[in-house]
Image: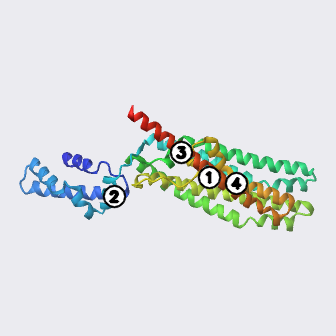
Amino acid sequence: METIKNYLDSMFRGLPLTDKVMKAKSELLQMMEDKYTELIRSGKTENEAVGEVIQNFGNLEDLADDLGIMDILHATKYTEVQRRKVSFEEVVEYLSAKKHSLVLKCLGIFFCIICPSCPIISDTLDMNDVVGVTAMFVSVAIGVVLMCLSSAATEQWRFLKTEPCSIDAVSIDYLKNKLRDFTPTYSILSSVGVLLCVFCFVPPMIFDELILRKGGEFGSVFLFVFIGAGVFMMVYAKRMKKTYHKLLSLNEIIEFTEPKFSPDSIENPTARVVMKVFWPVVTCLYLCVSFLTFRWDISWLIWVIAAVAFSIMKAIFTVNNEKNKNNKNVENAARDED
């Protein structure tokens, strides 16, 4: 039987370790074991039984259609993509780094959302307007810095998005268990986050009814805090769950194609960070300008200007990426000739 199992492993070697492939392998092993048992009972020797089992079930191409993996076998056989093996230790390290990165990113978003509450607090406490405006921009700055640190925390794992990778069966089992354990947390965080955003209007109503004079304006502060906390929970839950699914799907990407433009595809680290925080910064700028001037009829132009600026930067970085790739190809070709 050990010979049959070893032969089966060799048959499936090179195929992606997806649920579909693992199920097909289990089914084929059961078929081979049943046939082996039947032959032994009929009087065959162990060597004769093993030989006949391999003869009947040893060609995976003939069985692939019945096992439902013909498409996977065909794609794997003719693809020339070389995958980068991600070890179990790397998977664990990446998950830890990703959690840390998501906390920083969500905190950054939180500080950006609550920034309009700073002028409200300073006005309520009869403080100088400069204090409130300064605190608002400090809150935005803290948010942007945290989001930049978030990107830096996972910088070494950028290859997971830009290169074809694969993980082993041990990592798959580990990730499935982690995902199963995280599912209740995901449901709780998502539900509470939605409730906080839906009922964010409750604090202003309570303060307006129960608190006299200027104290009622603190209700607006809690409105932004509720929204910030709700978005924090929803973003963290969704992104963490997406991380588990992405790692589990690494083996399912049979034909790897270059991804469309994204900040992760930019070679220059500084430019990559700038592009990642561009839209959050624009959003904060829009809110700050709008709440300071109350000229909502004009402040929307910030989005138009930002879109033009983003398109220009995107075009520049794309051209630079292509030049870098061409230079690398030329260097590799020259090295091969030497």
**Residue at the top extreme of this rendering:** 338
- Residue at image mark 4: 309
Q: Position of residue 109 (x, y in %)?
A: 69, 53
Q: Position of residue 165 (x, y in %)?
A: 43, 47
1 or 3: tag closer to the N-terminus: 3
- Residue at image mark 3: 158
Q: Are marks 2 and 3 in contact (CB under 8 Å)?
A: no
Mark 4 or 3, which is nearer the eye?
Answer: 4
4 or 1: tag closer to the N-terminus: 4
Q: CA distance from mark 1 to mark 3?
A: 21 Å
Rendered position, 144 above or below 303 = above
The circle drawn on residue 315 is 1
**Residue at the left extreme of this rendering:** 43
Q: SS for tag 1? A: helix
Mark 2 or 4, which is nearer the eye?
Answer: 4
Q: Are marks 1 and 3 in contact (CB under 8 Å)?
A: no
1 or 2: tag closer to the N-terminus: 2
Q: CA distance from mark 4 to mark 1?
A: 10 Å
**Type of amino acid at the residue the image marks with label 1:** Ala
Q: CA distance from mark 1 to mark 2?
A: 37 Å
Q: SS for tag 4? A: helix
Quarter occupied by residue 269: top right
Q: Are marks 2 and 4 in contact (CB under 8 Å)?
A: no
Mark 1 or 3, which is nearer the eye?
Answer: 1
Q: Is residue 116 visible?
A: no
**Type of amino acid at the residue the image marks with label 2:** Ile
Front residue (pair 305, 83): 305
Q: Is residue 37 left or right of residue 332?
A: left
- Residue at image mark 2: 72
Q: Position of residue 258 (x, y in %)?
A: 48, 52
Q: SS for tag 3? A: loop
Q: Residue at x 26, y 63 (%)?
A: 65
